[in-house]
Image: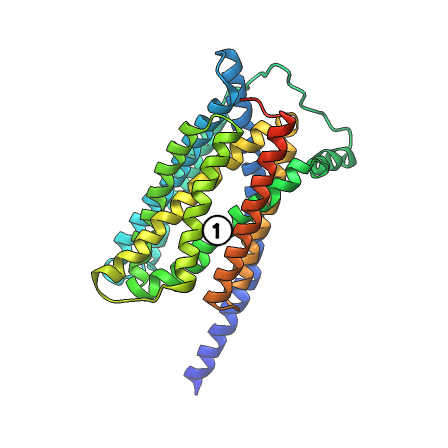
Amino acid sequence: MEGMQNSDHWKVYDVNGIRYTMVPASLYLGFTASIIWVGQGTYLTSAALSHARENNFPEGPTLGSFNGEFWGMFASTQVIGNLISLALLRNGKDGGSVTGKNLLFAVFLGFMIVGIVLMCLLSKRDEKRDNAPTHSSFGAMLKYIVAPLKDRRMLLTIPLIAYSGLQQAFVWAVFTKSIVTPVLGISGVGGAMAIYGAADVVCSLVAGRLTSGLRSAAFIVSVGAILQAVVLFWLLLFYSPTAGLLGAAIPLFIGALWGVGDGVLNTQLSALLGLLFEDVKEAAFAQLKVWQSGAIAVIFFLSPSITLQAMLILMTTGLFISFGSFLFLTLVVEKSSTVRP
């Protein structure tokens, strides 16, 4: 009886621990991450445009190359991190010992310190035609941030931004739980996500090199959208977990295809915002994180309470709406000739 009471006590403690530590920590990390990502997008775009003007390079390909290299390096963390996870879980271990956790936290802290030091060494890029505004009040700053919402180009881009968040969260919250784990087990999640990350790296680098302007971005996004549509229809209509070597290979193949789509969206969205909204870069990348993060939150809230089939229908609907909106955007912008090659 006493043992049961102790067990109940620890369950209550665990719930309260999550409530009073994990929730505030999540809010804090979300707030700080938004600042980092807006700064990253703004600085990368400024550096790319400045580099293009100083060396008389075309701005579209330069933006594409900068974004491709950045997102390729960023996606490589999926490979490294998940290979470490695979190594820890290969014998069914959960890697949950105090020593293991402390080692991981120490490694993460080390990378953070290195990143902060490198950030402090970044040079300021003085762009020609730099119209960066100064804000005399919070109201003026808020007006600047929401200004892109008055531009129909941003309104047509938002569905694709939201879908980019949906498809990222789908991998983290649904793909690993409902597709990988039933076939490969928890120990196979690291390997599947490492393959996803490797495909993401290669696609980011290639897509960045192929970007030359709006037309090339439209073509590259079309390829990524078609691949993800194939995966969604396959999972929705034909897929069922199977045993054997083929059954184990299918989740890995799906992860690779999905990684291609993620690499396409990351590189092309960042390059697209840099081209379309050069004069309001900070506001444009703020909108990117607002809609992207909101879409990620939707998937995480819905995933525990809806079926895999319902989630796949939601993803497919989101893909068609966002891709249709993006195609309409390319027609509108091409006709108005507002985007430089």
**Residue nearest the observer in this picture, 168 or 222:** 222
- Rendered view: 157 above or below 126: below
Residue 89 falls in image quadrant = bottom left
> In this view, which residue lies farthest toward the top?
55
Residue type pointed to by label 1 = Gln
Q: Is residue 26 left or right of residue 245?
A: right
- Horizontal side of residue 250 vs 32, given as left or right: left
* Residue 239 coordinates in the image, percent (x, y): 36, 63
Q: Kindly identify the residue that appears in the image at 57 percent across and 52 percent down.
A: 295
Element under label 1?
helix
Which residue is situated farthest in the bottom direction here? 1
Q: Is residue 274 visible?
A: yes
Residue 263 on image: x %, y %: 42, 40
Examine the image and state in which quarter residue 290 appears. Answer: top right
| Residue plotted at (54% across, 56% down) | 317
Q: How many marks?
A: 1
Residue under the image location 40 percent in, 49 percent down: 258
Give the image location of residue 308, x and y in percent: 46, 65
Quadrant the N terminus occupies: bottom left
Q: Which residue is mark 1?
A: 167
Badge 1: residue crowd in 10 Å (few <14, some 14–19, many ≥20): many
Looking at the image, residue 296 lies above or below residue 17: above
Q: Residue at x 28, y 53 (%)?
A: 86
